[in-house]
Amino acid sequence: MDILIDDINILSEWGINVMNYTPILSVAAERDVSYEWGDRSGVQKGDTNSRYESMDVNLPCYLEDTSEIAAYGELVKFTDYLFNKGVGYGNGVSVLTLANSSDRTCFLIDRVKQVVSNTNIQAGRAILVFDLELRIINPRAKSFQVVNSDTFSFDYGNRQRAMCYWGDGSSELLDGVGTYSHTYKKVGDYSVMIDIDTQDYISTIPNIPITVTPGAITKQRKGGEDEILVTCSDDWTINEIPAWITFENLVGLTVTGGVGSENLRVKVGVNDGGMQRVGAVKFRSISAEAVLTITQDGYEPRTTGIEERTTGVAVRIVN
């Protein structure tokens, strides 16, 4: 069985032999969360509301090298790799994969807290024996397997933010609904994990249409206000609003988004420039977009109707 952390084989990279990996395959305890109504009735547990606690595991391991110091040096390199991942959103989390020729399974693990080792000298070789303490932070985390590829993408239909670990040591914050993709440095097999319970993961992006009526407004140079109707069944936001345009609800509060269908006032300021200006304001739901185009006139140059003419008076120059 190969043991990989972020697609790095810990035996070939750091010389770490795991004597027993089966503790990883234990089943975590259920989270101690209970509900009780006024009549003291409980809530029936099911796949949609059961959760597992994070789980600590100890893996007995050993490192063999020419001396205790050399073996210790390899152990330090390994723990430094895990500790140095504490920067950024990843916060020290890695993807641990158990892989053989036909199967792969993966886990989200937190970095080690402490490694206690013992040295055994045999026939001029130093064997450093230690317990590798890891924490499986989400035993039910959603996972994908990338097979013989250097790219991967997936749809994320959840509104809640979650961390995605791409399986090569990199991570990304999933900031809501969308399609997320990643390019690897080389073609290979990777385990991708999202720190969200598998039963909570939504694999399709919801179809939430949105419309704005009217879709276009034309204003004179002095500006003014109009009323529009935003039609949507869900949350929506207003994006790319020019400085000369504001949106208010019907009670006079400035808004940059809303929930459900709503009438809004569009206020357009005075155009002090000589040129016409156009604003394309985007109204977005989690899966669709509608554009409101606002066109405003500028100054129009005017002529007096008086043309330059010569006086018809002859001038003589006397030397």
Image (cartoon, helix red, strand yellow):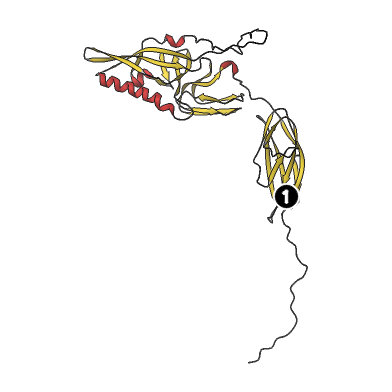
Q: Using residue 54 as the reference point, say whether residue 74 is left or right of it.
A: left
| Figure check: 298 above or below 20 | below
Seen in the image, is 247 located left or right of residue 137?
right
In the image, taking residue 202 as reference, residue 294 lies left or right, namely right
Towards the viewer: 309 or 266: 266
The answer to which of 309 and 196 lies nearer the viewer is 196
Image coords of residue 144 (percent x, y)? 53, 19
Q: Tell me where residue 254 appears, x and y as whole percent.
A: 69, 39
286 w.r.t. 12: above or below: below
Q: Which residue does the numbered mark 1 point to in the structure image? A: 296
User: In the rendered image of this protein, does residue 47 appear above or below residue 80?
Assistant: above
- Quarter of the image with the N terminus is top left
Q: Residue at x 69, y 43 (%)?
A: 246
Secondary structure at numbered mark 1: strand
Residue count near mark 1 (Cα–Cα under 10 Å), binned few <14, some 14–19, many ≥20 = many
Farthest residue, direction left: 124
| Residue 57, quarter of picture | top left
Residue 217 is drawn in which quadrant? top right
Most extreme residue toward the front, as rendered? 38
Q: Residue at x 57, y 26 (%)?
A: 161
In this view, the residue farthest toward the bottom is 319
**Residue 64: % across, % down:** 29, 16
Instruction: Give amino acid for label 1.
Output: Gln
Can the viewer see residue 100 in this picture? no
157 or 184: nearer the eye?
157
Q: Quadrant of residue 14?
A: top left
Count the marks: how many? 1
Front residue of 315/45: it is 45
Residue 172 visible within the image = yes
Can you give x and y, in whole percent of width and height, for residue 202 in the image?
61, 20
**Residue at position x 77%, y 43% in the image:** 226
Q: Quadrant of the C terminus?
A: bottom right
